[in-house]
Image: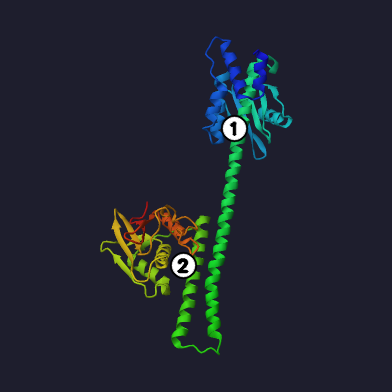
Amino acid sequence: MNNASRVGLATGAGVAGAVLIARSRMESRGQPSPDPIYDLTRTLTRCDVIPDILAAIERSFTSATGFPCAIFIPEGDRLSARHHSPRFDPDDNDIVNAGLSMKSGRPVAQLTGTPDLYSHFIPLTTSRDTLGSFGFRARGTRRRIPRRMWALAESFANQTSLALLRVTLEGKARHAGILAEAHRLQKALLNSIAHNVRTPLASIIGVLSTLQQEEISLSHPIRQDLIDTARQEAERLNRLLGNLLDLSRLEAGVLRIRKDPCDVQDLIGAALEQLGSAVGHRRVEVKIAPDVPFVPMDFVLIVQVLVNLLDNALKYSPVGPSITVEARVLSGVLEISVSDSGNGIAEDDLPHVFERFNRGGRGGATGGIGLGLSICRGLIDAHHGTIRAERRYPCGTVFAFTLPIQLER
């Protein structure tokens, strides 16, 4: 194969052609022939972000040719040199000429302030768009640059275009995936809210309608039972709206934590009082170790954590066995656990119980939209604590969270 054929291969942006060019150049000097484009291609497969890509291209090109280079990429409505060799300090003229190469789709050359030293710009063109301009500095115009060397520069420009296109498409794919997931979560949230708001509202409206009908004679126990049902549904609706408010504050980053020393006994009592009739006649055993001190926390927010954990235990455990709330000092932190004797959570579901909208495969008549545990994690994280879930043997689930005993400095 003659030199012209080799140049033709490189101009076509083929890796094999570029390899032949590099070999012929080095062989003409009687030196071993590295494969700069092949090596660059392997390096670029390990680069996932634009700065790493541009740095790898600049190093490889300078090493292979001895020419300093710069890569120009649009940022907003202006063109800038995103990466350049130390010996190529781009100025305003370089920016202008790089832009001209992009607009014309052809290489542009400009004489620098140094006699016979030119800046050359090759547009980074893909099948979709022109992504920027590849610039390098060499003695003389294009006619004086060896054809093999110019072809190698074009191959580097082509590799730069392909690498930038790959990263751009990957970024768009990730963005599309994020939007799709956000849309899915939004739809799931709206559907769940609609269902879980309508159910208690329907019960409350039904009770009020029944009580309003004077022609229906109701005994005192039945009337009281209807009122209790309406109150429970109203409390359930209030907890749902409270969780949604906490979620919006967490996501907006406006949640403010105000820590004051709090009595753990008061904390547990406030949570049980807030649950009100949801506890009913259920047995809740409270165990507080004698050495538990006052602990700095945002009382209202940690009460909400306990309410969510207790509400979860009440939903998923049978009426007979007791639910246990235990507080103790463990390794310098306060640990509060809520244990139940239900069917427990499957081992495969345990790593996902604190994810939003996850209900551990335990949907059904229990209600809820899978936000309570996710909000618990967010509130505990905001306190620089930890939260976990584990199976309780022989049956049941344990949720436990920790809080620092001392204020952070």
N-term-proximal mark, 2 vs 1: 1
Residue 155 screen position, x and y as percent: 63, 24
Q: Disc 1 on helix, strand or loop? A: helix
Classify 277 as above or below 80.
Answer: below
For label 1, the residue is 163
Q: Which mark is residue 366?
A: 2
Q: Quadrant of residue 261?
A: bottom left
Amino acid marked by disc 2: Thr
Where does the N terminus fall, quadrant-wise?
Answer: top right
Q: Quadrant of residue 87?
A: top right
Q: What residue is at 58 percent from the left and 10 percent from the top? A: 28
- What crowding class fits label 2: few (fewer than 14 Cα within 10 Å), some (14-19), or many (20 or more)? few
Evaluate whether residue 86 shows in this view: no
| Left or right: 330 as drawn, with respect to 77 | left
Q: Is residue 75 above or below residue 122?
A: below
Dot 1: within a 10 Å radius of its alpha carbon, few (fewer than 14), some, or many (20 or more) residues?
Answer: many
| In this rendering, position of residue 398 left or right of residue 203 | left
Look at the picture and state if 52 lies above or below 336.
above
Task: Tell me residue 76's x, y (percent).
Answer: 65, 40
Please provide percent x and percent y for residue 398: 35, 60
Residue 67 higher or lower than 212, as above or below: above
